[in-house]
Amino acid sequence: MSEKTEGINIPTSWRVKRYWVYALATVVALGLPWIQIDGNHFFLLSFDKMKLHLAFIQFDMQELYLMPFLLMIMFLGIFGMTVMGGRVFCGWVCPQTVFRVIYRDLIETKILGLRKRIKNKQQEPDMSKAENKVKKVVAILLWTALALIAGADFMWYFVPPEDFFSYLANPTEHWTLIGFIVGIAAFLVYDIIFLKENFCVYVCPYSRIQSVLYDDHTVMALYNPHRGGDIYDEHHNKLFTKEKELKAVTPSAECTTCESCVTVCPTHIDIRKGLQLECINCLECVDACTTVMGKLGKPSLVTWSSDYEIIDQKGKTQYFRPKILAYIGLLVVISIILGMMGNTKEHMLLNINKETRLYSTKLLPDGKVQVENAYEFLLQNTQNEEMDFFFEVIPPVGMEGKITIESPDKQFGVVPNVKKKKIVVLRTTEVLADDERKDTVIPIKIRAYAVGHEDKIVVFRDSIFIFPRADILKAAH
C-alpha cells in the first residue's frame, strides 16, 4: 500500500496506520468485558462483589497484593515505551487522542463537513454561519452519545455487563453507578469538545515526565535542519517565512516553507523548532512532509528518528540499548513473579482463631480424660457455585489419629462469596504430654477442602493444640 511519485515511494500514511490501531484498541476495549471463561473475566475489579478477575482467574479482595505488580508493569511499560519511542503512547494509544480523532476527524470533518480538511487542524469552523451552528449542535449530541458509551465501557471493568444492565433496570437503587457514567460522559464532552489538545499540553503530567526519560536514541518526529535549513534560531525565533527568503541565506535548503507540517499538527506546534513538550508523536507532520517532498522526488524532511541519527548525525539509532534491555528485563521478571503468585492462588479462604479458653477437660466412664480445644473457623467459598466443605486435622509425627475432630461431624454447604463461621472442636483422649510445670503446645495442621474437589480446592493452615499440664489431668479424675 504505497504511492510512487517521481521515483519516490510514498508509503501508507502514519495517520491511516494509527486509525487501524485505534480501531483495534476500540474493539478490544469494548469487547474484552464481555468475554468470560468459567464465569471469570480477563480484568475486573469489582468493589461490589469484592473480587478481582485477572487473566480469567478470580481472586478475592484479600489477594489484592497482585495489584502493585500490575501497576508496576503498566508504568514500566509506558516508561520503557517512552525511552524507545517518545510519546508514542500519546499519539497511538491514549484515549484522549483516540477520542479527539473520532470527534474532530470523523464527526466534524467526515460526517458533518464542519471542518474542510483533516490536513488542516489549525483552521477552526466559522461559527457565524447558522448552518455550522446546527452542525456543531449535532456534533455535540453525537459525541455525547459516544461519551455515554465510553463511560459505560469504563464501568464494565468494575461492574461486569451481566450485572451492569440489570442494575440499570433499577436506576433508583444504583444512583452511584449512574452518577459515575454521567460524570465520565460529562468530563469527556468538556474535555474533547472544549478543552481539546490543551489537556495534552497543560493538564496531562506525562508530558512533563518525558523530558527526563528521553535520551539521544529516543525515536520521535524530527525535522532535519541539515537538509531543510534552519527555520528558527537558538532562541526559537523564526528567521524566515518564505522559501525564497530561506534560500537567499541557505541556497541548499530543501524546505519549501509550505508549512503543511504546521497546519496538520493537532497540538498546534511547528516541528521545525525541534523537540517540544506538546509533541505527541502522532506523526501527522511526517505524513504531510512526505507527501510534499515526494512530489519533488525527495524524501521527507520530517522523519520518525532520533537526535543521534538526524541532528547529531553520529550514526544509526540504537533501539535495544542497555536502558531498553533493563526495562525489558524488569518487565519479564515482574511478569514472572505475577504469574507465579497468580498460580499459587487459593481457591477458598480460611482464617483460624483459637477461642480464649485454652481447653476443657472431661472425665469419661472408662477413666480416661477427654481434652478439647475449640476454634473459630471463618471460611469463604470463592468459587461460583455452592459446594460442600469439610476439615481434617494433621497432628505431628507420632501422634497420628490421637487428635480428632468432634465438631462439625459431617460436611456442610457454603454458598459463593459469603463468609461462613464454624465452631470447630478438636479432642483427644490420649496422654499427649506429661509436663508437671506448664501446658504443652502441640503444633498441628488443618486441612480444609471442598468435597469432591479435594485435589484443587484445598488449603492448609497451621494452628496449635494445647494439652494441659499433669496436675490438671489428675484433678479431672
Image (cartoon, rainbow, N blue to C red):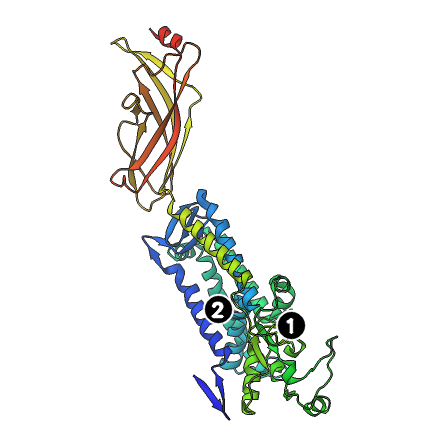
Q: Name the kind of residue labelled 1 in the image.
A: Leu
Number of the label disc, if any, that sits on residue 146: 2
Q: Would residue 323 appear left or right of 471 to someone viewing this image?
A: right
Rendered view: 4 above or below 127: below
Image spot of residue 323 (x, y percent): 55, 61
**Image quadrant containing the N terminus:** bottom left
In the image, 332 versus 129, the foreground residue is 332
Q: Specify whether 244 is left or right of 466.
A: right
Task: Tell me, for residue 275, which label it has, or none.
Answer: 1
Query: Is residue 118 visible in the rendered structure shown here?
Result: no
Secondary element at image label 1: loop
Residue 472: horizontal and vertical position, in percent? Answer: 39, 9
Q: Residue furthest front?
A: 314
Q: Calculate the distance from the C-alpha at mark 1 to the C-alpha at mark 2.
A: 34 Å
Residue sitting nearer the eye, 338 or 91? 338
* Disc 1 residue crowd, few under 14, some 14–19, many 20+, Cα 10 Å: some
Q: Are marks 1 and 2 in contact (CB under 8 Å)?
A: no
Residue at (72%, 90%) from the top-left corner?
245
Q: Callout 2 environment at 10 Å: few (<14), some (14 to 19), or many (20+)?
A: some
Residue 290 figure quarter: bottom right
Asked where in the image residue 448 lies, by quadrant, the reply is top left
Residue 415, compared with residue 183, is above or below; it is above
Q: Quadrant of residue 311?
A: bottom right
Q: Is residue 110 left or right of residue 411?
A: right
Secondary structure under the numbered disc 2 in the rendered image: helix
In which quadrant is the C terminus drawn? top left
Rendered position, 261 above or below 94: below
